[in-house]
Image: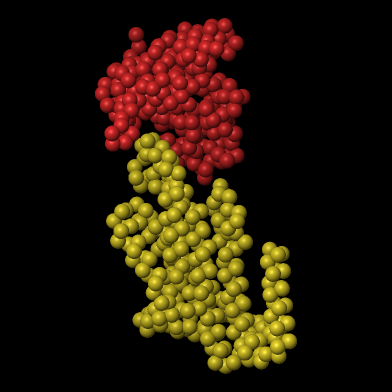
């Protein structure tokens, strides 16, 4: 059994809405992500998936329960690229934030462009890039932060259907090559089945773990693979959307 | 641009027509053709005046920009500076410039010093306000991201907030160039031996109205040229921002 990169046990989080009212967001969530694995977290919208990710990344303290996690870098639905910086400088931002000189940061960042299929776009500004390309640059920036865990919060939610399919392909390749532990929050069950080694299914708020499924399908996976289709269907049924 | 020339031509035509039809004394209001004649006749005087006024404006704007950026950065980064320095800067804008100009001439003399000081005094304020506005309007997610990636306060400022504020600083600079020309005239009238403001002041008691108007036109041309120059520099320096609407 490999070591665990992220472990949450009995994590409870309540948030105060106003003086007299509190809402329970996470209700005794227990999960773990093995080092180097990809764990997808799916659940109905508004169930607290993003909150769970912030707790796992140490950005939020749980009300009770324990979190043991290696340092994480987060990537969100908004790519947050700097409009004045080129793609290369945007990717290199993670290294410059950590104190590297601009030249060294750019040199290291440049290695990722061919791996993510964006070679040749180094000197293009974000406004000239498509949504899918921008997410690749944001992903390069997240990887370059050099943290053992990457937390992806609906990274492709804003992309059109075709760009999404493309995005899954490069993300799957990058995760397979990278040796990082990835936490992927998504509302797209198919995306979870295609990318993850384990899928955590959450209930509506307050979020509880309904099921933790190991995905034993060989990679790379295809959408039309009967095993993928069957698993997607069974998870949708767990979420009450099987029809 | 062509439309602006048309508007100017219509205004000049109306002025010319008024002078001819009303028979007004050219000592009270010279007609445009007399002003144009003065522009030509006094060209060497006006050219050397333009040179010295432009020099004062350039030095004053440079001082204003330097001071304004330092002030905006320190006010943005420090609550103490916001509380202590910002009110003083606002108060500085209520000073009656012609009076201050005379006092400065007494103190600093007839050379460049008091002129640079007056121009900087009227020109720095819009740059401070516009830069602070742009700094405050930076997308708050960007500094959060950079801090999450490990940058401290100063590095976050240089990587994210400073570049985000550059277009705002240019907006302020556009207002500043126009004010700086007015400031130059006040400064020269308080005590000077050359410059367009000086020539205007000398022309009036000599009843050289056409020359005074000609100097005003050269002054406007200087302001327009500076305004255009700022737009050009902005386009080179800030190519990511769409700055249409604020340029000539």
Q: Nearer the viewer, residue B210 or B26?
A: B26
Would residue A30 appear left or right of B30 to someone viewing this image? left
Q: Which residue: 38% across, 55% down?
A: B73
Q: Is residue A87 above or below residue B237?
A: above
Q: In this picture, is A184 found above or below A109?
A: above
Residue A20 visible: yes
Left or right, A54 with reference to B228: left
Pick the residue in front: A197 or A87: A197
Give x and y (percent) for residue A135: 52, 31
Viewer-proximal residue among B56 and B156: B156
Residue A185's place in the image compared with A110, above or below, is above
When asked about the image quadrant of residue B224, the answer is: bottom right
Question: What color was chain B assigned in the picture?
Answer: yellow
Residue at image point 49% right, 71% down: B180
| Residue at x 30%, y 61% (from the top left corner) | B84
Q: Residue at x 64, y 87 (%)?
A: B29
Q: Position of residue B160 (x, y in %)?
A: 43, 45
The tint of chain A in the picture is: red
Quadrant where the N terminus of chain A lies? top left
């Amino acid at each position: 059994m490999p070591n665990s990169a992220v472990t949450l046990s009995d994590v409870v989080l309540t948030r105060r809405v106003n003086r007299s009212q509190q809402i329970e967001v996470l209700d005794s969530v227990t999960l773990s992500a093995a080092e180097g694995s990809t764990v997808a977290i799916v659940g109905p919208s508004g169930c607290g998936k993003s909150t769970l990710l912030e707790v796992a990344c140490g950005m939020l303290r749980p009300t009770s329960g324990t979190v043991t996690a290696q340092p994480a870098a987060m990537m969100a639905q908004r790519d947050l690229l700097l409009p004045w910086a080129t793609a290369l400088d945007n990717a290199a931002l993670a290294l410059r934030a950590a104190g590297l000189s601009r030249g060294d940061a750019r040199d290291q960042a440049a290695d990722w462009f061919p791996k993510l299929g964006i070679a040749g776009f180094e000197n293009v500004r974000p406004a000239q890039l498509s949504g899918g390309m921008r997410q690749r640059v944001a992903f390069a920036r997240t990887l370059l932060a050099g943290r053992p865990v990457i937390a992806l919060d609906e990274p492709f939610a804003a992309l059109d259907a075709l760009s999404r399919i493309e995005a899954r392909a490069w993300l799957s390749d990058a995760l397979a090559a990278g040796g990082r532990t990835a936490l992927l929050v998504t509302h797209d069950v198919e995306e979870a089945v295609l990318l993850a080694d384990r899928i955590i299914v959450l209930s509506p708020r307050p979020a509880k773990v309904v099921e933790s499924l190991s995905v034993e399908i060989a990679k790379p996976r295809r959408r039309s693979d009967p095993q993928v289709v069957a698993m997607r269907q069974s998870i949708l049924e767990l979420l009450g959307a099987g029809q | 641009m062509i439309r602006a020339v048309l508007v100017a031509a219509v205004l000049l035509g109306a002025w010319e027509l008024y002078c001819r039809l009303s028979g007004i004394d050219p000592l009270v209001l010279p007609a445009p053709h007399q002003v144009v004649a003065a522009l030509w006749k006094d060209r060497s005087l006006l050219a050397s005046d333009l040179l010295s006024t432009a020099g004062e404006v350039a030095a004053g704007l440079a001082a204003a920009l330097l001071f304004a950026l330092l002030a905006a950065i320190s006010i943005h980064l420090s609550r103490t500076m916001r509380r202590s320095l910002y009110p003083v800067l606002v108060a500085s804008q209520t000073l009656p410039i012609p009076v201050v100009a005379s006092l400065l001439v007494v103190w600093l003399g007839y050379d460049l010093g008091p002129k640079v000081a007056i121009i900087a005094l009227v020109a720095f304020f819009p740059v401070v306000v516009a830069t602070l506005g742009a700094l405050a309007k930076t997308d708050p997610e960007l500094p959060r991201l950079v801090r999450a990636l490990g940058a401290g306060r100063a590095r976050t400022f240089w990587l994210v907030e400073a570049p985000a504020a550059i277009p705002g600083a240019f907006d302020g600079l556009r207002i500043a160039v126009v004010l700086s020309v007015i400031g130059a005239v006040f400064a020269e009238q308080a005590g000077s031996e050359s410059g367009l403001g000086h020539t205007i002041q000398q022309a009036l008691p000599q009843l050289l109205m056409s020359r005074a108007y000609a100097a005003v036109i050269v002054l406007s041309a200087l302001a327009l040229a500076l305004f255009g120059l700022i737009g050009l520099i902005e386009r080179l320096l800030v190519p990511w921002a769409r700055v249409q609407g604020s340029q000539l």
